[in-house]
Amino acid sequence: MSGPSLPPAAFAAPELIQRLRAAVGDAGLVTDPQVLAALTTDWLGKWHGHAAAVVRPADTQEVAAVMKICHDTHTPVVTQGGNTGMSGGATPDASGAQLILSTTRLNRVRQVDPINNTLTADAGVTLAQLHEAALAHDRFFPLSMGSEGSCTLGGNLATNAGGIAVLRYGTARDLVLGVEAVLPDGRIWNGLRALRKDNTGYDLRHLFVGSEGTLGVITGAVVKLYERPTARATAWVGADGLDHLVALLARLRTACGERLAAFEMMSHESLALVLAHTPGLRAPLESRHAYHALVELADTHDFGLGALLESTLGSALADGRIDGAAVCTSDAQSANVWKIREGISHAQVRAGRAIKHDIALPISALPVFVREAEAALRAADPAVHIVNFGHLGDGNLHFNVLLPLDTPPERIHHATLRFNGLVHHLVRAHGGSISAEHGIGQLRRDELPLYKPAFELELMLRIKQILDPNQIMNPGKLL
């Protein structure tokens, strides 16, 4: 089935399709133009490509067979999970020569071990399915984000996804114990080890986590589970300065320790945007504040979480650190504030064309950075509309600029280059990163050499050349 190794020009497309069909069967190969059109466009509608076909292997062995064929024929491969990425990393180019390898049929939860607190699953299992599988064993998998019904385990690992629980549990990288991956030449690396301690050399799993499909295909993983939180306390806070929220975060860490599960921030402009474009939501506080925060404590037992949160916020109010606070007294109120936070991204899509900045900085640097960045943007364009929100607890801001819906594409292009340059220059000056949780993909690929040391990029390229000598894995992305 592998056939001889041939240069690309010597391998006709019909023969390639025939070999792929033999490897995965009719159910595993998609060539219908309408289906291809949906899978060759990212969900934001920003990147559009073409593909020779979509191959949907049913298990790791079929993935290995597909990769062997693609390696032999020098066929470029774009791995795709739920196609929910924000940086164009799972969208093929316009050549029509690239193959999409979809992991959606790799959808088995292989094992749940509640004693070891681990779960082993295929790469195509959705995040929502992981949550359900863990819950069925009275356990908790903490990775959480708005796209959890569609995004997949493999995609979450390949992009080192973040989400709303990083403050307490870390990113996807912190939650994975073992990885199974198929290398570009079709060899299978089985690193599915459910160990907290394994001091036997290089930790190869971390090569694939965050690699954005450029080193191989993640086909399965072992992830950490936790005791299921049964008690929560949620509050909404208003403050007149971002420095006040940073000070509140420090106070909550001291008072609440690991029970502090979330600390989400949004500016007044972000709150107004989501309320204007999402029916049924209302502002948690009557008074207007420059900044707002959603705070949540969680624990396996209710050791007076509500009282702890209320007393900590009360002392912050008395000290003038914050200017308003409301502790949720019902599940409906908690659901309302979380819908506000989770609705910002969709509100941006409805309201205009967002120039996105998914950035990370030291938490202590955030107030100064925001002041300088807002001043720089307004000096460039006094009418600029800034939508600033994010995971303040881990230093990740979505510091976006919103343009009107009818903005011409050429204007969007020039504004993007200008505003990205201003914001990312300040990010670097304050020791931050230009990509916190969305990845590099196509979006930041050309900018990356400006902000990442040349020697780091050289090391990354050397690793890729060793694992992917034919350069077939997700070309045009990341590197």
Image (tube, rainbow, N blue to C red):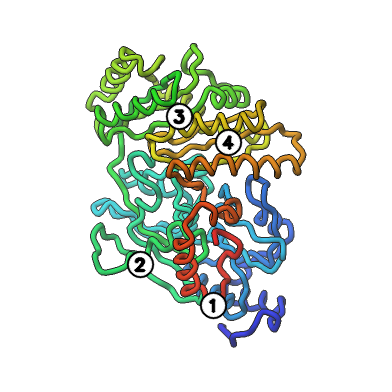
Circle number at residue 265: 3
Q: Which residue is mark 4?
A: 400
Q: Amino acid at mark 3?
A: Met
Q: Is residue 359 left or right of residue 226?
A: right
Q: Can you give x and y, in whole percent of width and height, for residue 313 in the image?
A: 32, 19
Q: How many marks?
A: 4
Q: Amino acid at mark 2?
A: Gly
Distance from the alpha carbon under mark 1 to that under mark 2: 20 Å
Classed neighbour count for the residue bearing mark 1: other residues with Cα under 10 Å, few (<14), some (14–19), many (≥20): many
Q: Amino acid at mark 1?
A: Lys
Residue 71 sits above or below residue 438 on the image: below
Q: Are marks 3 and 1 in contact (CB under 8 Å)?
A: no
Q: Which residue is mark 2?
A: 191
Q: Earlier in the sequence, mark 1 or mark 2?
A: 1
Q: Amino acid at mark 4?
A: Asn
Helix, strand or loop at disc 4?
Answer: strand
Residue 257 sits above or below residue 94 on the image: above
Residue 458 visible somewhere in the drawing = yes
Q: Earlier in the sequence, mark 3 or mark 1?
A: 1
Classed neighbour count for the residue bearing mark 4: other residues with Cα under 10 Å, few (<14), some (14–19), many (≥20): many
- Look at 44% across and 60% down and name the residue there: 122
Q: Are marks 3 and 2 in contact (CB under 8 Å)?
A: no
Distance from the alpha carbon under mark 4 to that under mark 1: 42 Å
Q: Which residue is mark 1?
A: 68
Camera-nearest residue between 307 and 315: 315
Classed neighbour count for the residue bearing mark 3: other residues with Cα under 10 Å, few (<14), some (14–19), many (≥20): many
